[in-house]
Amino acid sequence: MTRFITAAFAAMLALAGCDAVPGRPRPDARELAPTEVMAFETLYARNCAGCHGQTGRLGAARALNDPVYLAVAPPERVRRVIATGVPGTAQPPFALSAGGPLTDSQIDVLVRGIKDRWQRPGAVTGHQIPPYDGGRAAGGDVGRGRAVFASACARCHGDDGRGGPRGGGVADSSYLALVSDQHLRTTVIAGRSDLGMPDWRGDGGTAPLTPQQVSDVVAWLVAQRRPVPGRLP
């Protein structure tokens, strides 16, 4: 009986030690499935950094690490752009329901992480913020917009909007084919702080743009868009 008990005890110890066999992965070391990742840093690096920059700045697309942009852009708009993308532009949808790789919870993590890390209270104070939504339907006038561009934008982007000493071409067909009307409006309002472009308040050399002037200059920019051969409308 003693030998039997000893043998049974030894067998139990051997079974209990199976998980500690050298080379066997620990349960907590299991690789997470893509839809299980909930760390902002990982989600941002995998899905956003390629266009918006590793630190949220200096990417090909708009800087997300921009307190002014986060102050003027409604959070629900930021979430919708991540989830459903912007048709006709380089911004793809990321929600599973729209054919992307991310769950609703993962998109919530991204939106909350962007806000918590890069939003700053008081980033926009003392000025009336022009209405964020708009684009082509914002009631802008192309003729007035040309005058607004000449006074507020041409010294950087050139008289015709095709590039100047301090700014790239914003009336270029290739650029305009890649961005939405709302993107143009967002850029006029929020600027591109990572590239040195001031927001609608100007850099001190010009007066802040009024809401109507924002709509007018966006209307002029939209009017410069031309069909690009080989690109579907």
Image (cartoon, helix red, strand yellow):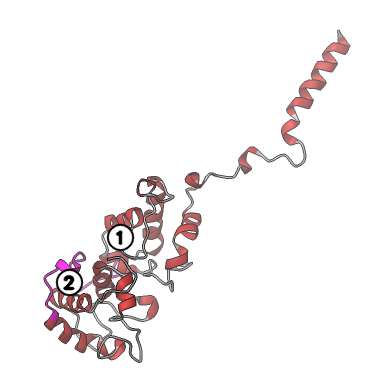
Name the amino acid, label 1: Pro
Residue 21 shown left or right of residue 99 in the figure: right
On residue 87, the disc is 1
Q: Where is residue 120 in the image (x, y as percent from the top left)?
A: 34, 66
- Predominant SS of the magenta segment: loop
The residue wearing badge 2 is 128
Q: Where is residue 149 in the image (x, y as percent from the top left)?
A: 21, 85
Residue 60 shown left or right of residue 75 in the figure: right
Q: Where is residue 195 in the image (x, y as percent from the top left)?
A: 38, 79
Q: Where is residue 227 in the image (x, y as percent from the top left)?
A: 27, 74
Number of residues whose C-alpha sits closer than 10 Å to that of mark 1, classed few (under 14), some (14–19) or many (20 or more):
few
**Residues shaded magenta:** 120-142
Please give the name of the residue rendered at 80% of the width and 19% of the height, measured from the top-left corner: 9
Number of residues whose C-alpha sits closer than 10 Å to that of mark 2, classed few (under 14), some (14–19) or many (20 or more):
few
> What whole-number distance in Å separates the C-alpha atoms at marks 1 and 2?
30 Å
Please give the name of the residue rendered at 14% of the width and 68% of the height, measured from the top-left corner: 138
Q: Does the magenta stretch include residue 15?
A: no
- Secondary structure type for disc 2: loop
60 and 40: which is toward the camera = 60
